[in-house]
Each structure stands twice: as structure tokens, then as C-alpha cells.
Image: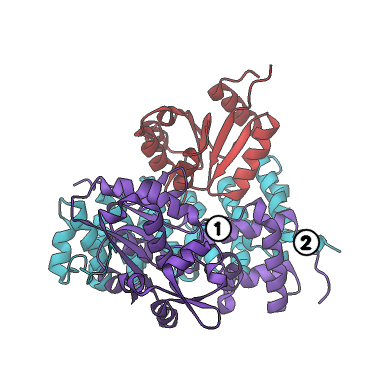
């Protein structure tokens, strides 16, 4: 019996970053959806079951922390989807702000392949 | 037939005086602050009041209206007041400022050179986005000039991201050089190759 | 003109990302053939020798090239019951929600905010009369507006050709139109009299404010043509013209996610629509 692939929603306004994560995550057996800002991510979540969010902070229209805060206020399973923040911002306040907004983990860009796969597997509950 | 036709009833009176705007911006009611923020667009002198209120504003919709009014006022002063917010620790304020600058007609051309030379790498990262507002050749040249002197990995990443859209053939040598300099950073190698593919796609066809 | 090779994968993605960023329109794989064809057409029309030179021209929006490119996808030649999934959403879901906020004797107000020659507001009227059981219990006001006074004159005359009626059954046409000579049909006078038309530039708050607040706004394939600054202003104007809890419907390739953060997204069985929040925090 094969288990269905886990779905990861990559939320980042940079097209090259989305392509980069997609290539890594698909090779590792994940299904990938993309959104280019927090608003699009919220819209996507209305129609897709997602197992993990990989979220940039600096995005137009709705930044990543506002997106996470909005999401965590929702009722039901949406509120507790694991979220990995991946951002260029690297100050202590940024980590604290992300945690307060509802992020589970924080990686500073640029992200390495092994890091992304390891965190994706861990947060999706997938064996290596 | 139950379809009716009625004379329209306008929504609210627009606020007029600077005093009314100031009072409105300080109101406890988000609806009042919204109305004041929108009315401020007609009064260039209220730019400073808008800029002062923005960092304190917790309502995202009111904040949006405040930024829009600063853009609509459209003076160099009002646009300059947005700049410091690019440095804010508040991600919503920071990105609201960037969105507003992107909507400003002259922000890209006039402010880009200083922003791309800012001592703060985080500001340089955000500023690369503004290059999208320039014609392709000009944007490509500005970003290549940045890459020539830039050592921060994420700033290069941001510049390469925009070059993938605006870059012309003249950008290829700089991108190649970047690829050599940052061969140890997997994301940059990937991004540079992809950007060059997007720029070069035309030239490669027979 | 020599046969042009198909745009590459990279070129296609680059173009789609740019158009989405610039207009909010989403072009997916299914549209690929049409996008490629449009690129060829516009390269020929602009004398562009390569995709790269066309793309650079598109980015500067020389001579309204973005509008020229996008026009092919918005089908300016409108017709009745176009994108009827939104009409279904209106009667299946949106009106029910709006009514739960209303009292007896209240009016439901619907605005067709880029009504062109009138197909959309008249479609809404006919659809409600045909499909909404509540149509006799509530007063419904339908307003159509456009920036273009010439098309508004056409809307006022309420006269249409065969092509505009192509999605309507003979029964509907017989019920709501009078046949005129030369294959023209005119909306019956009772219906004509109940839809009002007005000039509105969506970017001008003085013009939009004059029309009060609505329960539902249809604003399809208009915001895509605005630049960033105008789009912000128009979105704020439209927000003001919605009652708290009111809905706004965009064109089916458009998304608010590139246009404005003011609205919340709602997913219904028939459509995704956007909503002004019910409650504003003090």
C-alpha cells in the first residue's frame, strides 16, 4: 500500500525561490503548491489540503507573519498546519516575531537542499 | 416587477479641513481613521500626519489607505516619508512601504540608486524589487552594477530574481561572473542558471 | 511573416509571472495555446523580431501594449449569461447571506461596475427573475456603470444582436425581449426601466461615492487594466461602496491576491468571491 504524497504549500513572491524549493521537494517525493503572497496562500488553502507551509516573510499585499497570524485565528485544521518560515531576515527579533505569529521553525535563507528536505520530512511526519 | 430604480444616496461626506483630518486620524474608530486617511489624499500638507500615524496603526485596512494617500499626494516629500518604513521591524509596515513605493511614479527612477547603495543589506534586498518599475534596459544595468559590487548573498539573490524578468543579453557576463563567485552557494548557482536560461532563451533558438 | 517558433517554457513562465504581477490575471497551462497565439499576434502587430524584444516592449507598456495583449482574453464582445457560475453563486449563496442581514422592506442593491453595453446588468436582472424565489419578496435595485459614455448609450437603448443572446433559450428571449427588424432584440420596457445606467470612473472617489453602498458588486476584467496606483485607489473606492459583509465578484482569471488586501476571500460551491468584512474593529 502506498501512502499519498504529502502536500507542501510554498509561499514566496520570488519565482526563482519557488522553483528551487519545488525541484528539491518534488525530488524528495512531496507534492508542491505555490502561492506568491499571504493572500494567495489563504485562497489556495480554501481548496487544497496542505500538510506543511514554507513561508517567506517579505511579500507584497500580505506578508508572511500577517498570513500566519490570520491563519492561526481560523478555526479547525487550518489553524494548526505546521509552518516553516524561510526568510532573509536574520535578527533575534525576527525569530521571536515569527514564533509569536505561529511559526514552528525558522530557517534563514539561502536554504540548503538537505535542510529543507529534513525539515519537510520531520514536519510532515515522513520517514527518510 | 420587483426590480426598483431609486435615486442614489451618497456614502458619507468627505472630510475637508486639515483639522478634521488630524482628528480623524487619531480617532478610536477604525472607520473614522479610514475616512480621514482617504480624505488626506487631497491635502499634501497632511503627508506628515499620515507618516506619523502609520507606524502606530494596527488596522491593516487603515494602513493601506494611509499608504495610498501618501502615494496619491505624490510629492517628493510624501514619497520620502515612506522610505524610513522600509527599515521597520514590523514586516507588515515594511512591505506596505515597499508596495507604496512601487505604486509611485518616480520612486523607482529617483530613489533606486541610493537605496541599492544603502548600508543595510535588508534595505538593498527590498529595493531590488523597485527596479521592476524601470524599463528593462535601465533595470538590467542598475542590477548588474549592484551585482558587481555586492557581497551579501541574499542581496545577490534578490537582484538575480528581478534580472530573470528584466535582464537583457548584456547582463549575461555579470551573471556568469556571479556564478563563479558564489559557486559554493547552491541556491545562487541554481538561480543564476535559471535567470540566464530565461534571458538567453531567445538567443539559443536557431 | 515567417513562421515563429513556439515560446520556450522559460519564456512562457516569464511572461505569465510578469502578467500576473502587473495585472492580477492568472494564465495557467490550459491557456498556454491561447497565450502563445496572442504573443505571435502581438509580435507581428508591433514588429517585434524576437520574444525578448516584445517582452521588453510589453514591460514599458508602450502604446497600451498590456491592454492590447490582455484584450484577447477578456472578450470585450460580451454576451448574456457570460460566466454564469457567478450568477449561480449569487442566487445560491450570496443573496441568502445578504438577506440574513436585511429587514423586511430593505432593498438589495447590485452594481455592475464595468457594464459596457449592458449585457451584464440585464443578465443579472433576467437571472434573478428566472432563478430566485425571493425575487417577489424583496426589492432589487440594479445599477450599471461604465467610464465610456458611448457604450452606456448602447446600454440605455437595450438593443442587442443575435450573438449577444447566444446563451439564452428561445423561451427567455421571448419573455424578456421584443424582436426588432434586422435581427435585433430589445429588452422589454418594464425591465429597461428598472435598471439604471450611469457614468463612473472607478478611480474617482467623488464619482463612486455618489452611488451609495451595495450588497454585491460585479467588477469583471477591469482592474487588470489599471496600474498599481490606480488599482489601489479603485479597490479602496469599491470597498467603500460595499456594505459590511457585501460581496465583490471579479473576472474568472482575476484574483484579489494581486490587487488588494482589503477584502477577504470566500469560497462557495459555484465561485470564489471577495467580501468586505462584516465587523470593523473599533
Task: Kindly indicate which chain is depicted in cyan in the rendered structure.
Answer: B
Q: Which of the pair A4/A73 is nearer the observer?
A: A4
Asked if C36 appears above or below A25 in the picture, the reply is below
Residue C183 appears in which quarter of the rendering? Answer: bottom right
Q: Chain of mark 2?
A: C
Find chain A in the image and tell me its colour: red
Which image quarter is the N terminus of chain C in? bottom right
* Mark 1 crowd level (few <14, some 14–19, many ≥20, 10 Å Cα): some
Q: CA distance from mark 1 to mark 2?
A: 21 Å
Residue at (57, 71) in percent of width and height:
C163
Residue A10 - label: none
Helix or strand or loop: what does disc 1 sit on? helix
| Label pair 1/2, CB-CB below 8 angstroms | no
Q: Earlier in the sequence, mark 1 or mark 2?
A: 2
What residue did someone put label 2 on? C6
Q: From where the camera sits, is residue B88 visible?
A: no
The spot of residue A30 in percent (x, y) is: 64, 30
The spot of residue C155 in percent (x, y) is: 42, 76
Find chain C in the image and tell me its colour: purple
Left or right: residue C231 versus residue C243 is: right
The spot of residue C145 in percent (x, y) is: 37, 72
Residue at (57, 68) in percent of width and height:
C75
What residue did someone put label 1 on? C20
Left or right: residue B206 versus residue B111 is: right
Left or right: residue A36 versus residue C265 is: right
Q: Chain of mark 1?
A: C
Residue at (66, 19) in percent of width and height:
A128
Amino acid at each position: 500500500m502506498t501512502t499519498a504524497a504529502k502536500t507542501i504549500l510554498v509561499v514566496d513572491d520570488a519565482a526563482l525561490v519557488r522553483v528551487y524549493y519545488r525541484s528539491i521537494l518534488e525530488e524528495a517525493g512531496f507534492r508542491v503548491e505555490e502561492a506568491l503572497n499571504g493572500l494567495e496562500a489563504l485562497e489556495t488553502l480554501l481548496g487544497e489540503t496542505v500538510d506543511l507551509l514554507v513561508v517567506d516573510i517579505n511579500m507584497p499585499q500580505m506578508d508572511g507573519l500577517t498570513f500566519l497570524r490570520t491563519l492561526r485565528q481560523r478555526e479547525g485544521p487550518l489553524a494548526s498546519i505546521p509552518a516553516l518560515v524561510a526568510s532573509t531576515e536574520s535578527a533575534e527579533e525576527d525569530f521571536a516575531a515569527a514564533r509569536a505569529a505561529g511559526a514552528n521553525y525558522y530557517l534563514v535563507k539561502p536554504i540548503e537542499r538537505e535542510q529543507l528536505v529534513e525539515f519537510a520530512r520531520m514536519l510532515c511526519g515522513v520517514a527518510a | 416587477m420587483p426590480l426598483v430604480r431609486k435615486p442614489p444616496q451618497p456614502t458619507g461626506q468627505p472630510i475637508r479641513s486639515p483639522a478634521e483630518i488630524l482628528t480623524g486620524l487619531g480617532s478610536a474608530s477604525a472607520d473614522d481613521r479610514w475616512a480621514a486617511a482617504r480624505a488626506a489624499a487631497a491635502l499634501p500638507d497632511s503627508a506628515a500626519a499620515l507618516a506619523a500615524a502609520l507606524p502606530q496603526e494596527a488596522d491593516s485596512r487603515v494602513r493601506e489607505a494611509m499608504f495610498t494617500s501618501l502615494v496619491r499626494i505624490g510629492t517628493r516629500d510624501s514619497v520620502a516619508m515612506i522610505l524610513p518604513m522600509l527599515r521597520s521591524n514590523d514586516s507588515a509596515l515594511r512591505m506596505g512601504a515597499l508596495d507604496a513605493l512601487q505604486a509611485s511614479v518616480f520612486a523607482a527612477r529617483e530613489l533606486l540608486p541610493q537605496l541599492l547603495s544603502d548600508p543595510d543589506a535588508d534595505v538593498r534586498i527590498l529595493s531590488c524589487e523597485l527596479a521592476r518599475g524601470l524599463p528593462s534596459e535601465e533595470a538590467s544595468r542598475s542590477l548588474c552594477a549592484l551585482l558587481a559590487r555586492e557581497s551579501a548573498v541574499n542581496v545577490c539573490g534578490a537582484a538575480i530574481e528581478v534580472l530573470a524578468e528584466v535582464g537583457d543579453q548584456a547582463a549575461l557576463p555579470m551573471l556568469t561572473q556571479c556564478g563563479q563567485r558564489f559557486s559554493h552557494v547552491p541556491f545562487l548557482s541554481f538561480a543564476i542558471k535559471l535567470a540566464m536560461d530565461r534571458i538567453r532563451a531567445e538567443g539559443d533558438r536557431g | 511573416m515567417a513562421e515563429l517558433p513556439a515560446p520556450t517554457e522559460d519564456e512562457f513562465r516569464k511572461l505569465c509571472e510578469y502578467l500576473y504581477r502587473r495585472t492580477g490575471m492568472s494564465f495557467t497551462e490550459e491557456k498556454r495555446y491561447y497565450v502563445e497565439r496572442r504573443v505571435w499576434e502581438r509580435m507581428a502587430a508591433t514588429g517585434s523580431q524576437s520574444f525578448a524584444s516584445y517582452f521588453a516592449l510589453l514591460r514599458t507598456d508602450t502604446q497600451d501594449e498590456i491592454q492590447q495583449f490582455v484584450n484577447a482574453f477578456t472578450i470585450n464582445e460580451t454576451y448574456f449569461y457570460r460566466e454564469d457560475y457567478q450568477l449561480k453563486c449569487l442566487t445560491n449563496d450570496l443573496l441568502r447571506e445578504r438577506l440574513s442581514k436585511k429587514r423586511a422592506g430593505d432593498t438589495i442593491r447590485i452594481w455592475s461596475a464595468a457594464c459596457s453595453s449592458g449585457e451584464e446588468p440585464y443578465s443579472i436582472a433576467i437571472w434573478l427573475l428566472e432563478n430566485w424565489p425571493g425575487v417577489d419578496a424583496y426589492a432589487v435595485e440594479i445599477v450599471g456603470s461604465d467610464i465610456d459614455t458611448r457604450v452606456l448609450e448602447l446600454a440605455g437603448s437595450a438593443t442587442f444582436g443575435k450573438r449577444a443572446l447566444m446563451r439564452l433559450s428561445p423561451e427567455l428571449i421571448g419573455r424578456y425581449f421584443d424582436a426588432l427588424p434586422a435581427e435585433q432584440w430589445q429588452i422589454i420596457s418594464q425591465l429597461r426601466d428598472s435598471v439604471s445606467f450611469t457614468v463612473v470612473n472607478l478611480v474617482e472617489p467623488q464619482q463612486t461615492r455618489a452611488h451609495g453602498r451595495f450588497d454585491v458588486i460585479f467588477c469583471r476584467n477591469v482592474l487588470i487594466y489599471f496600474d498599481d496606483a490606480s488599482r489601489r485607489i479603485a479597490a479602496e473606492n469599491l470597498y467603500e461602496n460595499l456594505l459590511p459583509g457585501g460581496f465583490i465578484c471579479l473576472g474568472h482569471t482575476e484574483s484579489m491576491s494581486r490587487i488588494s488586501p482589503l477584502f477577504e476571500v470566500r469560497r462557495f460551491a459555484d465561485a470564489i468571491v471577495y467580501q468586505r468584512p462584516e465587523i470593523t474593529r473599533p
